Image (tube, rainbow, N blue to C red):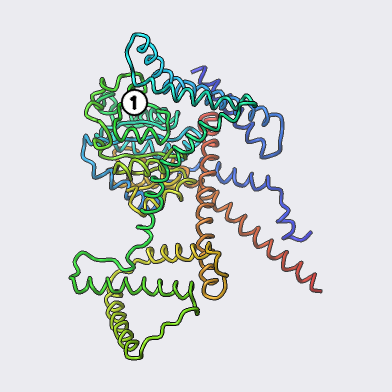
Amino acid sequence: MNFWKALLAIDRRWIFLFVFLALAVPMFLNVDFDLSISREVQGLYDALDKLQPNSKILMSFDYDPPSAPELQPMADAIMKYCLKKKLRIIIMGLWPQGPIQANMALNRAFLEEDINRDDYVYGVHYVNLGYQAGNEFVIQRMGSAFYEMFKRDYTGNRYEELPLMRGIKNFNDIDFSINFSAGYPGTVEWVQIAVDRFHVRLGAGNTAVQAPQVYPYYNSGQVVGLAGGMRGAAELEGVFARFDGGTVDYKDKGTKYMLSQTIAHAVVMFFIVVGNIAYFVIGRKDKLKASK
Amino acid sequence: MGSDLIGVWIAAFLTLGIMSFLYKDNPWYKFSEAIFVGLSAGYWFASLFWQSLHAKFWANWSPAVQSLFQGQFDYNLLYTGAGILGLMMLLRLIPPIGWISRWPLSVVVGGTAGLYLINYLVSNAVRQIGSTIQPVVTFPESIGWINSGGVIIGNVLVFAVLIVSLGFILFGRNTTIDLPTPTKLFFFLIALVACALGTFYSLSMPLNLTGLIIFMGVFCGLIYFFFSKEHTGFFGGAATVGTWFLMVTFGASFGYTVMSRMSLLIGRIDFLLVEWLKVVN
């Protein structure tokens, strides 16, 4: 068997091993990436930056733990920024585990020295309305009355007992919305109903799989900013670190694991290129043999 | 702390069990998979029961029925209709009268179709068409009306050329336009002047290459899916260009998918190295 045929016949488990090593080994390295910021992520930052303190921001956590490696770094970075900027945060979820992921982001943000937990009162500065079943129909109903969908919050407090929610009837009382989405229901439904029907200003954080589906909404202005996948998370961490004075440590897992992503992609591309070369070389030799 | 430690060890055991499939199918993998499927089914059953059936139906319908017995009418009694439709859905489990389940299904399909008709038309058709057809040259705010006129003419000419090309592609040699020579000359001169003006002013403005590429991609992509005319000649060439655009799109989606899957694997490796083995900070 010649070299190229041996290459094509390589056991796929070797490739798995190479990819695993490409992902795992860089985790032991402490490399600080300075990524270029795409206009989509810059758009998301600009939209947040323009908000005045005490502006009301609605965050919908529409994902669960399997998608957390991509979306949690985004959620962590945005949560830190919003708390530091003293925005009033309203959390909800169209996925059952979403509000739990939101609490994790809150707890991580409160670990920062510049974000003192004692300065933020639950129900006044931030609130977690919890999960609501009903997918896009929840968004539809929120367009007329938040209260109808969230009569009690995540911990069982009544809607009217939460000072932050007293002045909020529907989307008209929200200054900006962010959706962290891993599929259905997610950004597509938020765009179709909240944006196009109720004129909500929306930013989105998506898994990489979903990002190509959401890009057209960015080009058409239906979402003002977009962060896609771990690269988007790393860019978000970078843009916050660059423009927010460095008092809060934004750079976390998104940035840290971009080295693993980069090397793993290089390995995958290497195997694709070598596999194709081998395929064409063998094909050419076989054709030559057949012609003889 | 103790329960956390046990939880981490169980999670690590099951994670490695699932990963062991990459080597080959084995009982450890099957055990982990069965636990995953069973836990997921149990979780979703409990979640749907409490979050949907109880919270959405029972919590609204039950007080309404109690009010009725006390002689008061509550609009939540309308949930009775939803409850009946739900029960009809379950009749699928009784084969002789299983056909009844088609009725609630038709309500679901009809309602969803009605909602999505408008949503998709506005969000995925009208707004997307609007963002596809962009000016080829952009308008700086400072330019005067004369220059603006030039830019408009430039844009109109570019799109006119594309539309005329489309006309020739679709109708080709089947039609001939026979006009008197002076009229042809007049139109030719007008077109020449407009072309010169448009080109002159357009070239002095920033060119929106992205918009042009997107338009060409959509145009050629649509031609690829137009099967009423044979894909030969210029039409075939445009269809081939459409294929390239489609391939680039699929490639971008594939790249993003690879990134997504790598991220998920990073998440599990992160768990193993950071939370379980604690060898990485």
Q: Residue at x 49, y 21 (%)?
A: B49
Q: Position of residue B71 (x, y in %)?
A: 33, 10
Amino acid marked by disc 1: Phe
- Inspect this view and state whether residue A237 appears: no
Determine the image quadrant of residue A133. Answer: top left
The number of discs equals 1
Q: Residue at x 29, y 77 (%)?
A: B198
- Inspect this view and state whether residue B97 appears: yes
In the displayed structure, would residue B187 be above or below residue B256?
Answer: below
Q: Nearer the viewer, residue B275 or B86?
A: B86
Q: Which residue is mark 1?
A: A150
Determine the image quadrant of residue A132. Answer: top left
- The residue most toward the right is A292
Q: Chain of mark 1?
A: A
The reply, left or right, for residue B39 in relation to residue A244 is right
Q: Position of residue B251 (x, y in %)?
A: 53, 56
In the displayed structure, would residue A284 be above or below residue A273?
Answer: below
Determine the image quadrant of residue A237. Answer: top left
